[in-house]
Amino acid sequence: MKSNTKKIYAAADLITFILELNLALVVGIIVGFVILGIGPSLQASHHMAKLRHQQKSLPFFKTFFSYYKEIFWQANQLILPLEIFYVAPMIVLLTQHGDSLSRGLSIVLLISIVIGTMTVLTLFPMVEFYKVKTSRYVISASRFITYNPIGCLIALGCLALCLYVVKLFPGVTLFIFGLAVYLNMGFYLRFFEQNEEKVQKSQKEASLETNSLKGVLEK
């Protein structure tokens, strides 16, 4: 009985968190006048999701907007160029000429959209996990896709499923985007942890080989 009560409480707590995450995400976008709010709001949402996965409990909205303010310009340095030079032209092209595009060009654009979306999905969690120069994040996110394409496709599939659910049931919009961010951060935390384990294992093996060779040479 106590076990069931704990499960119900945990489920209710998670649902509350996702609703708060969804609300904060939307408010953050509005506060930034949409264009300037998308990057910081998504980054702050992934930060809160990371804390949740790491079982760190902090005042939700205070932590969210404090972090939002802290990373506002960095997030826009990452996302704003993508919005201006990729997303906006792509939207114009598809809305105005989508019906007249050749099959070959349509395939190229589809591949471009898939790669671009996977890069963005990787980018936000990567900022939370790794500390590199701001100008290097997009390149690093693109490279990670080649290291773990299956994992990145799983994350992309999860986002596509969430968007499909919204199309079928518009009423879940108040819940679904927070869920998508929560799941995306969870996926990539695991991917990055596995990547670090592989790197450490490789370094350890390389160190053992070096020490073994050094021992042979010293004999």
Image (cartoon, grey):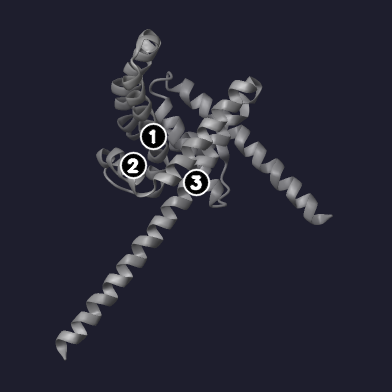
67 sits left or right of 147 in the view: right
Secondary structure category for the residue under label 3: helix
Taking the spot 27% from the left edge, 70% from the top edge, the residue there is 206
For mark 2, give the secondary structure: helix
Image quadrant in which you'd find residue 193: bottom left
Q: Which residue is mark 1?
A: 120
Look at 66% across and 21% down and name the residue there: 171
Residue identifier under label 2: 141
Helix, strand or loop status at disc 1? helix
Residue most toward the front?
103
In this orientation, does residue 198 appear?
Answer: yes
**Image x and y of residue 50, in percent:** 50, 46
| Circle 2 Cα neighbour tier, 10 Å, few/some/many (<14 / 14–19 / ≥20) | many
Residue in view at x 40 percent, y 40 percent:
122
User: How far is disc 1 from disc 2 in space, using C-alphas?
Assistant: 8 Å
The reply to whether discs 1 and 2 touch (Cβ–Cβ < 8 Å) is: yes
Q: CA distance from mark 3 to mark 1?
A: 14 Å
Which mark sits nearer the N-terminus, 2 or 3?
2
Position of 10 compared to 106: left or right?
right
- Distance from Cα at disc 2 to Cα at disc 3: 14 Å
Residue 61 visible in rendering: no
Residue type for callout 1: Val
Q: Amino acid at mark 3?
A: Phe
* Chain-order first, disc 3 or disc 1: 1
Q: Is residue 218 above or below residue 185?
A: below
Amino acid type assigned to the residue bearing label 2 in the image: Ala
Q: Earlier in the sequence, mark 1 or mark 2?
A: 1
Q: What residue is shown with label 3?
A: 187
Q: In this rendered view, identify the residue nearer to me: 148 or 27.
A: 148
Percent across and percent down for residue 140 are 30, 44
Quadrant of the rendering where the C terminus is positioned:
bottom left
